[in-house]
Every structure is written in structure tokens, then in C-alpha cells.
Image (cartoon, rainbow, N blue to C red):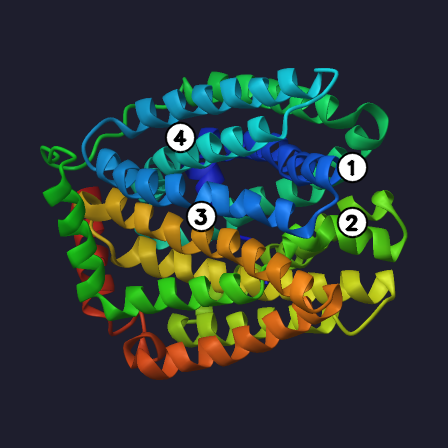
């Protein structure tokens, strides 16, 4: 059951990526809380908060695919450092806007769009680094450790964000985030160059469509994208948390709501040693996504803060299980020469879903009620992932012991080490 920390002991570059990600994600989660809080404060509208996700959608799609192509073409280290600096500048704009006597709402939407574009450019290169700096048989442990980094940021970041919002408003939150970007860049600068294996193709439209063609040919991978997308679209009501917080006792509960799911994820990660014994990753992904939907639905049936936090923690733990096995499938079966483009598609699958989920949940809350938005989303999630599992049987049957793709990459990495 114990968390496997081997990659941190054996890989210097993985340690740097882990530390940098922990710091920058901590700051990003502070902004993640502050941005919808500021929009809610300025407008008091469910829809206005949900529209943040809609504003982020198009740049994330465009730059996520292009960022994946760049990750298969240029030095991934350079790409990550450049985009980290760009994100820091954008958060600085949020800070300046928040200090104005009358902060402008349009600035929040424009910067949110640009941050999504930068994230789309960066994440494929960042994800594609991991299989290059970690041994093949340590990828499951690396996935759990990477998840631990997100969870620590998701727990501590919103809690700090809530305190900063209470003490100094959005300006204090954005200011701390700017500092974390500077710290992250210092650590990333020490990374070794990480270029794609082989010559690398130019990031043309044909290069991008070739990556999409590979993804389409792998129905097991397609199933992981579909399940995650369905779960997030129907059961990601985080845009409603500022309003749920008011219903449960006030703004002081907001950080707890954002952190609860990460607490469940953290518990799963710290006991993730058992994941090494699981080989039917597809079934684990489908079942975990269904439990995520159940947890979100149960949030809608209670008005007690303790029960809400418990159900969010259960949902977060289930999402973590799904995330670990999705990451293991991706890292163990995708060749390095297409890894960046596949990471771009992965980014779309686990980022577009939450963005559309914010729109769906806020729209449902406006048409029905706050609680009904949670209940309906959870039920639709369970139904949707069940249909996806039936429609894509190669996902349900996936076994890393028999998958030809996993065997090929295992043999390839063994030859590289020798």
C-alpha cells in the first residue's frame, strides 16, 4: 500500500520537475480560487462564473493541439520554461487589474483565455518529459507522485487562497501566484535538454493530423479520453462552489470545498502501492469514473457541510484512481515520437471536460436549482461512462500484460537502457 518514491531517488530531472510543479501549481490553485471569486463578487451571476470555462475552451483546443506538435519538434525544456514565464506575466496583469479602483470584468475573461492558451502550449511538453526521465518500470510510481504534487497543491492552494482573499482580496492571491512562477522557473532552468527521439518533424498541420490519426487507431486510448471527457462534462460543478459556500456557511468554507476532492485524492495516492498489482487498467478507469459521478450526485442531496466534504473527498479519490491508470496506460504504450501530440490530446480530454462542465453545471443551476445541478450531473456521468465502456470494448478488455503496445514500449526501453 505504501507510496513508491523510487523515481524521486533515481532521477534528478524528475525531482526538479516534481519540485517545480509543486510550487507553481500551489500558486495556480490560489488563482484558480481567486478568479471565479472575483467574477462572482463583481457580477453575482452563476452564468458569469461558468462563462470563464467557455472563454478558455477555444484557446485550449487550438493551442493544446499545436503545443503537442511543438513538443514533438523542439526542446521540451525550452518550451516549458518559456510558457512558465508567459503565465507569470499574465497573472501579473490580473494583479494590476485587481489593484484598480474599479477592476474590469473583461480583463478577467481575456487573461483567462490567454492562460488557457499558454497551458495548452506547455502541458504536452511537460507531460512528454516524464517517460524520458523515468525508467519504464517506474512509470506507475511516477504517475502517483505527479498526482501527489497536484493533490498537495489542490489542498493547500485553495486553503491559502481563501485566507488571502479574506485578508487582502484578489490582489494578495495573484501576488503570491506571481512569486511561485519565479521560483518554478529557477528550478526548471536546471533541467537537462529533452528533445524528441529522432530528428523530430516540423509542427505542420499534417504533423498534427498524423497524431490525431494515431489516437484514432488506438481505441483503448480513445476510450480513456472519452470516459474522462464524459465524467468532467457532466459532473464537474466547481463553478458553483462560490454559491455552494454561501449556502453552507459563508466564504470561509470556499477553500474547504475546493480542497475536499484533493484530500480524497491524496489518501488514494499515499496508499497507491496496490496499483502496481492491477493490470486491467481500462476496467479500473471506468469503475472509478462512475464512483466520481456518484460522489458528485450525493453532494446535491445534503445541506450539511461535513457530508458535502465527505462526498467530495470520495469523488476526488475515485478521480485519482482513474487518473493514475489513465496516465500509466498513456506512458507505457505511446512511442516517444508521438508522445507530445498524444499529450496534447490528453490535455484536451482532461481540460476541456472541466471547462464544459462549468458551463453545464452553471446553466443547469440557473434552469433548475443549485442542488439539482449536482444531482443531475452525477447521474448523467454514471450513465455516460457506462455507455462509453460498452461502445469501446477494447478499453474494458485492456490488460498491460497482453497489450502489444505496452510490450513494444517495454522492450524498447529495455534496449535503450542496455
- What is the number of the mark on residue 142? 3
Residue at image mark 1: 162
**Mark 4 secondary-structure assignment:** helix
Give the x, y percent position of residue 299.
74, 68
Left or right of 248: which side holds 373? left
Residue contact at pointers 2 and 1, CB within 8 angstroms: yes
Q: Nearer the viewer, mark 1 or mark 4?
A: 1
Disc 2 to disc 4, how far (Cα)?
33 Å
From the viewer's side, name the closer residue of 249 and 179: 249
At horizontal 41% and vertical 17% (from top left) the residue drawn is: 189
Which one is earlier in the sequence, the residue at label 1 or at label 4?
4
Q: Is residue 158 in sight in this rendering?
A: yes
Relative height, residue 394 to residue 355 (above, below): below
Quadrant housing residue 93: top right
* Structural crowding at the residue carrying mark 2, measured as other residues with C-alpha within 10 Å and reported as few (<14), some (14–19) or many (≥20): many
From the viewer's side, name the closer residue of 28 and 63: 63
Relative height, residue 13 to residue 397 (above, below): above
At horizontal 50% and vertical 17% (from top left) the residue drawn is: 89
Give the x, y percent position of residue 341.
25, 45
Residue at image mark 4: 13
Residue contact at pointers 1 and 3, CB within 8 angstroms: no
Residue at image mark 2: 256
**Mark 1 secondary-structure assignment:** helix
Amino acid at each position: 500500500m505504501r507510496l513508491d518514491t523510487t523515481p524521486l531517488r533515481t532521477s534528478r530531472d524528475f525531482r526538479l520537475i516534481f519540485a517545480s510543479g509543486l510550487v507553481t501549481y500551489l500558486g495556480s490553485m490560489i488563482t484558480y480560487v481567486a478568479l471565479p471569486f472575483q467574477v462572482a463578487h463583481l457580477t453575482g451571476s452563476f452564468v458569469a462564473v461558468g462563462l470563464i470555462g467557455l472563454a478558455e475552451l477555444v484557446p485550449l483546443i487550438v493551442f493544446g493541439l499545436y503545443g503537442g506538435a511543438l513538443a514533438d519538434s523542439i526542446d521540451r525544456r525550452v518550451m516549458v520554461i518559456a510558457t512558465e514565464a508567459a503565465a507569470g506575466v499574465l497573472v501579473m496583469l490580473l494583479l494590476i487589474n485587481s489593484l484598480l479602483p474599479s477592476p474590469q470584468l473583461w480583463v478577467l475573461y481575456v487573461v483567462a483565455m490567454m492562460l488557457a492558451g499558454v497551458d495548452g502550449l506547455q502541458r504536452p511538453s511537460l507531460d512528454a518529459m516524464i517517460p524520458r526521465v523515468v525508467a519504464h518500470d517506474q512509470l506507475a510510481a511516477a504517475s502517483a507522485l505527479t498526482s501527489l504534487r497536484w493533490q498537495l497543491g489542490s489542498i493547500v492552494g485553495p486553503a491559502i487562497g481563501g485566507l488571502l482573499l479574506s485578508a487582502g482580496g484578489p490582489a494578495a492571491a495573484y501576488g503570491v501566484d506571481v512569486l511561485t512562477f519565479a521560483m518554478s522557473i529557477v528550478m526548471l532552468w536546471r533541467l537537462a535538454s529533452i528533445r524528441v527521439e529522432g530528428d523530430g518533424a516540423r509542427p505542420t498541420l499534417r504533423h498534427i493530423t498524423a497524431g490525431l490519426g494515431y489516437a484514432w487507431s488506438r481505441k483503448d486510448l480513445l476510450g480513456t479520453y472519452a470516459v474522462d471527457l464524459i465524467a468532467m462534462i457532466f459532473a464537474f460543478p466547481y463553478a458553483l462552489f462560490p454559491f455552494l459556500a454561501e449556502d453552507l456557511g459563508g466564504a470561509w468554507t470556499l477553500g474547504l470545498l475546493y480542497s475536499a476532492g484533493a484530500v480524497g485524492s491524496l489518501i488514494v495516492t499515499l496508499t497507491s502501492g496496490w496499483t502496481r498489482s492491477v493490470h486491467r487498467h481500462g476496467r479500473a478507469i471506468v469503475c472509478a469514473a462512475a464512483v466520481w459521478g456518484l460522489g458528485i450526485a450525493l453532494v446535491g442531496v445534503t445541506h450539511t457541510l461535513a457530508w458535502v466534504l465527505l462526498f467530495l473527498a470520495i469523488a476526488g479519490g475515485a478521480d485519482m484512481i482513474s487518473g493514475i491508470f489513465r496516465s500509466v496506460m498513456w506512458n507505457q504504450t505511446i512511442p516517444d515520437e508521438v508522445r507530445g501530440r498524444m499529450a496534447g490530446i490528453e490535455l484536451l480530454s482532461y481540460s476541456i471536460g472541466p471547462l464544459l462542465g462549468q458551463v453545464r453545471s452553471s446553466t443547469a443551476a440557473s434552469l433548475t436549482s443549485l442542488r439539482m445541478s449536482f444531482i443531475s450531473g452525477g447521474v448523467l456521468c454514471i450513465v455516460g461512462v457506462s455507455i462509453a465502456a460498452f461502445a469501446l470494448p477494447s478499453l474494458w478488455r485492456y490488460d498491460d500484460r497482453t497489450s502489444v503496445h505496452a510490450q513494444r514500449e517495454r522492450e524498447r526501453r529495455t534496449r535503450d537502457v542496455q
